[in-house]
Image: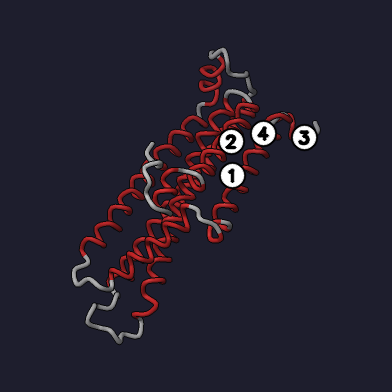
Amino acid sequence: MAFSLTSILPLPDMLALGWFFLCWVGYAWYADHRRWGTRELASVLHEYRLRWMRRVLERENRIADTVVLQTVMRSCNLFITTTLFIIAGLISSLGAVDRVQAMVSGIGFIAVSSRETLEVRLLVLIGIFVFAFFKFTWSLRQFNFTLMLFASAPMPAEKDAPDRADFAPRAAMMVTHGFASFNRGLRAYFFGLAALAWFIQPWAFVLAASWVVAVLYWRDSRSATLATLAGPVTGKELP
């Protein structure tokens, strides 16, 4: 019997999946490459981190700065643990596809799918959250590296320290790298939620992926939060 890809994944599902990855990869490229030339949330926050690191050099006591980083690291740990639970649940669902299919087929507004198609959908979800897990763990490691960089920061009295001039930009960029990885993991969560619409029907999946891109773009480029951080506070930024 000749193998046919459409026997596993119908054409509407393949098109919807292609659009999903186009939205995800396309927005990731935009967020990672276009932000530095525009006034977007990531570039504005990097400027604040640079100011923060310059002030670190002026402080004898840096416990508060360390606490800030440790708080972010706790958030990373929370997402790492949550992601592992999600992956475990999805793998369990993959081992009980027949029961999942029976449960889903009993919901009126959900299109009936074959066992193979349902397996592909679950595998895509597993892949999304595995990607998120790697990004969150890498973010946690980068923040650990930043703590070591903090420990090596020159003290205020060391005006002539050879590493004093480049400490602030180096440390700020390390924090930005950590947050960039964290944001990629968080973005995977957004698109993972959009992928849930695939269990309804392919076109709902297309709409959900497009909606996620619109939400992310608004938050990064047009939100009141960005207006507050990037310019003078006028009161118009209030929600």
Crowding at dot 4, Cα within 10 Å, few <14 / some 14-19 / many 20+, comes out as: many
Q: Amino acid at mark 2?
A: Ala
Can you say which quadrant of the picture contains the N terminus?
top right
Mark 3 / mark 2, whichever is N-terminal: 3
Mark 3 / mark 4, whichever is N-terminal: 3
Residue picked out by circle 2: 209
How far apart are the alpha carbons under marks 1 and 3? 29 Å
Q: Nearer the viewer, mark 2 or mark 4?
A: 2
Mark 1 / mark 3, whichever is N-terminal: 3
Crowding at dot 2, Cα within 10 Å, few <14 / some 14-19 / many 20+, comes out as: many
| Residue 48 percent across, percent down from the top left | 38, 60
Dot label at residue 14:
none
Image vertical order of residue 56 relative to residue 196, above or below? below
Residue picked out by circle 3: 3
| Residue 35 percent across, percent down from the top left | 54, 56
Residue picked out by circle 1: 24
- Marks 3,2: beta carbons within 8 A: no
| Residue 33 percent across, percent down from the top left | 58, 58
Q: Nearer the viewer, mark 1 or mark 3?
A: 1
Mark 2 / mark 1, whichever is N-terminal: 1
For the view shown, which residue lies furthest in the front direction? 234
Q: Amino acid at mark 4?
A: Ala
For the residue labelled by badge 4, is the local secondary structure a helix, a strand or a loop? Answer: helix
Residue picked out by circle 4: 16
Crowding at dot 1, Cα within 10 Å, few <14 / some 14-19 / many 20+, comes out as: many
